Amino acid sequence: MIDLFIQSVFQENLALTFFLGICTFLAVSKQVETAIGLGLAMIVVQVLTVPINHLIFQGLLIEGAWSWAGLPEVDLSFLKLISFIGVIAAIVQILEMVLDRYAPVLHHSLGVFLPLITVNCAILGASLFMVERRYSLPESMIYGLGTGVGWALAIIAFAAIRERLRYADVPKGLRGLGLAFVVTGLMSMGFSAFVGVSLP
Amino acid sequence: MSDLSPLTWWRRFLALPNDSLSKTLGVALLVALVAATAVSVTAISLKPRQQAHVEAAREAKLAAMVATLPGLADILRETGAETLEAVLVDLQTGQIAIDTDPAGYDYLAAQSDAAQGMALVAADDGAGIGMRPDLAPVYLLRGADGLALVVLPVYGKGYQSTIRAYLALRGDLRTIAGLSIYEQGETPGLGSRITDPGWMGLWAGKTAMDAGGAVTITVVRGAGADASQVDGITGATRSSTGVANLVRFWLGPLGFGPFLARLQAGEF
Amino acid sequence: MNNSGWQHLSTPLIDNNPITAQMLGVCSALAVTTALDTALTMSVALIAVLSAASTIISAIRHHLPGSIRLVMQITIIAALVIVADQVLRAYAYEVSQRLSVFVGLIVTNCIVLGRAESFAMRNPVWPSFLDGLGNGLGYGLILMLVATLRELLGAGSLFGINVLPLAVNGGWFTPLGFMLLAPSAFIILGLLVWVIRARRPAQAEADEFPILSREVEARR
């Protein structure tokens, strides 16, 4: 389990190895505080959605899931996209309401980025990878936690670098987006060094 | 009564204010219905084509595997066979399961589904797999003089990952025709050397079982002394003995042993 | 097609390119560009989904209640993506295997939802269709450019056909393995953005903290 966690944080980092959630990654990383808030929100959503999607997939969608009702040949796995997105949208909505009620300051500072998590490819991507690799329920929970932590780690580090770059004298065409891409590329190179790490 | 005609009803529905409850529910239901119908119709009508592709991919993987087993291409050419015949074996009895279609059987899923297999006690679990599925695929190659080749998909725990391989036995069911490891996650540069063609080639021609059916094949440290011993890899003891353990398990009474005994007796 | 129709089609190609100007749809642009055939298939799939989604959403825009607007859009997009995925798996199986989860990820591709929200919800059907088509083409253009560089320099081939003679086969070209790795896509894209903004200075971003000393020098 530990190696699954470490693998999903470093070697298979969703943002820097698989490029998932890059739009939000680039858009929200101008300041470290907002990056931390978004990272934490991502972790919470991932930890909730990956196991729930696992249960829905195993319990309702795969072939044979309806055999208890006398329909063993029904195979609804082609509906997994719609159902996963539905679950993600619902959980983000609930998270928003909970934050509004119990942590209004955080809710206000996250602002519009909380609903944007719904269409963050990293969340859907993690669920789809979970299905593809046939993880069990405990593995799904660890995987959700690991991917969330990995993505948060990436965006916080990136925001820290971008804050420093604000004062740099950058060529006009490279300013902003161009430099953000190149820096992400270099960070990705750094993280690819983890591939050689062997886990106990 | 033109007031009740569907068209007027439809127009009245569209004319409702967007935020009214009935409009909201109506639109939601309608969109969901149309989306579900479109998706289902596409999925069902395209399923046969997709199945054909999956079959072809499976055949291709098998063909690729056969190509990697050293010397196998020659055997195939000699027997003149095009491909291997896939059957499903009930591991408990050693019989061929005739009521399940080998093509549709998901062996990978069965390996982790407790409902489709038998749990193993630690003393019996030489391959470290925890549970053994009830049904397993076997690939047979029949030539002009009878059985030419039997290919067994085997898997087990290596040093740090699950090793999956195809073990091919010659027609006498005692000699190994070849071993082809197609999936492993062992230590790069050390344990992963079990996939070196040089090492896998050492298995070809070794005696797997003696005349009594007892499994004799083993991996030893250093150079192997007789026809049943394969040289171990220096620095990769755990990985190479992992391969030995899984081969021994699957050739034994809890693996394909019963099936091989029946095959030897000429039952199929 | 009248003038404004042509504009809907041509503006997203460079001036308002979804990837380099609007910063949408970047995820898939990086992951599927290791080879030209996957990039092409992904582009075609996205163009189909984007045009269809924009058209449908524009057609029903007057009757979408505000409270369920987002969910309805996502449902329509998800249904279209599933259909596209099924068609791919039936007619282009090997490529669809290599695309694996990324076709499914078109659902969350920011371009589709972004254009739906910002254009299709406010405009009639035909301009929405053209806008979807144009953005899809702009996305495809960037994808093909990046994929050409990555495949050519990383494997010496285009569409799987060997173009540069490989050293292992007796030629002179040793492939740059780096091009097949993740980071190269980011860096190529960054340099591409730089080139575009050098030729279209209007797109360049303003300097937040300009160095004052130059102005002080000039004033002296």
Image: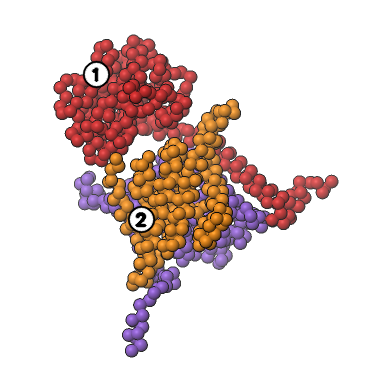
Chain colours: A orange, B red, C purple
Q: Quadrant of residue A199?
A: top left
Q: Is residue B24 visible?
A: yes
For marks 2 and 1, give the CA distance: 52 Å
For residue C175, side relative to residue C130 (left or right): left
Q: Which residue is mark 1?
A: B216
Mark 1 neighbour class, 10 Å CA radius: few under 14, some 14 to 19, many 20 or more: some
Residue at the outermost front position: A102
Question: What residue is shown at x 55% (from left), y 43% (from top)?
Answer: A83
Which one is in front, B203 or B59? B203
The secondary element bearing badge 2 is classed as: helix
- When asked about the image quadrant of residue B57, the answer is top left
Q: Is residue B259 above or below residue B116?
A: above
- Say what secondary structure mark 1 lies in: loop
> Which residue appears at 71% of the width and 54% of the height?
B20
- Residue B213, horizontal then vertical, whole percent: 28, 14
Q: Position of residue A102 (x, y in %)?
A: 55, 55
Residue C43 seen from this side = no
Residue A4 percent location from the top left of the image: 37, 42
Q: Are marks 2 and 1 in contact (CB under 8 Å)?
A: no
Front-most of C38 and B173? Answer: B173
User: Compared with residue C26, is residue C92 higher up or lower down, i.e. above or below?
Assistant: above
Question: Which residue is at 57% across, 61% downward?
Answer: C119
The amino acid at mark 1 is Thr
Residue type, numbered disc 2: Ala
Q: What's the chain of the residue with tag 1?
A: B
Left or right: B173, with A175 as reference point: left
Write down the residue under mark 2. C185
Residue at 69% in and 56% down: B18
Name the quadrant of the N terminus of chain A. Answer: top left
Same chain for the residues under marks 2 and 1 in the image: no
2 vs 1, front mark? 1
